[in-house]
Amino acid sequence: MAGRRPLAEALTAYEQTRNQTTRPHYELTSQFASLQPPPSEMQQLVGALLHNHEQADRFIGTIAGTVPIAEFFAPENVGQIIAGIEANAA
């Protein structure tokens, strides 16, 4: 809007940035809105969150937009959450 480049070019760049930034949140919301049972991996994760309040807060943060979805759902993080519940069960 400052006139540094043509409007169409600026709007295209904005759209690409917006889509890249919001896609993970959109996909997570769409998954929840499908009203389908979550995959077994998600069920296992949610079960583990019942006993891990810190990570449960971070999970809610993905919905609120305060925790990056890719960061929370990174295989390393999910593995640590699930390993924590398995260690407590042993």
Image (cartoon, grey):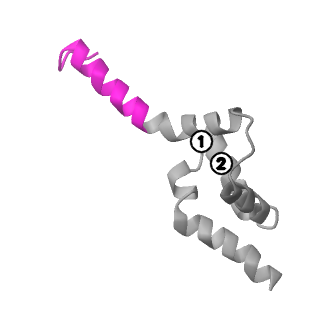
Q: Which residue is mark 2?
A: 61
Relative to 82, is 40 above or below? above
Which of 23/52 is in front?
23
The quadrant in which residue 15 appears is top left
| Above or below 88: residue 67 | above
- Tell me, yes or no, whether the two marked residues, 1 and 2, touch with CB atoms within 8 Å: yes
SS of the residue under disc 2: helix
- From the image, give the main secondary structure of the stretch colored magenta: helix
**Quadrant hosting residue 45:** bottom right
Q: Is residue 49 visible?
A: yes
Query: Residue 30's spot in the image, x, y percent?
Result: 62, 34
The residue at the point 65 percent across, 41 percent down is 64
Disc 1 residue type? Gly
Q: Which residues are magenta?
A: 1-20
Mark number, residue 65: 1
- Magenta highlight on residue 51: no
The verdict on residue 11 being magenta is yes
Q: Which residue is at 59% across, 41% downward?
A: 65
